Amino acid sequence: MKRLPRRCQEIFWLSRVQNLSNDEIEGKLNISKRTVENQITQALRYLRVSYTKLSTVSSR
């Protein structure tokens, strides 16, 4: 997660840890709902790829 841009980390944290809705994040950060959705998608994609790489390395 540390390799993601700070704003992407913040949005992902608010969504997944703080359990805020996209609308709540939009209002809190004063950004568009589409930006929130894109940043969460980016973070999930990064985590999915990183997890796959990690599980491949650890299974060797």
Image (tube, grey):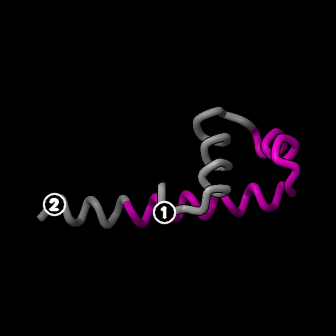
The one of 38 and 3 positioned closer to us in this rendering: 3
Marks 2 and 1 sit apart, C-alpha to C-alpha, by 23 Å
Q: Which residues are magenta?
A: 21-50
Question: Which SS class for mark 1?
Answer: loop
The residue lying furthest to the left in this view is 60
Q: Amino acid at mark 1?
A: Arg
Residue at numbered disc 2: 59
Indicate the position of residue 48 as horizontal and vertical percent values: 45, 61
Our reading of the magenta stretch's main secondary structure is: helix
Mark 2 residue type: Ser
Quarter that holds the C terminus: bottom left
Q: As displayed, is residue 20 above or below residue 59?
A: above
Q: Nearer the viewer, residue 30 or 46?
A: 30
Asked which secondary structure carries label 2, the reply is loop
Instruction: From the top left corner, tell me how far across and down residue 25 is, in percent.
Output: 78, 43
Give percent across and percent down for residue 23: 84, 43
Give the x, y percent position of residue 43: 57, 59
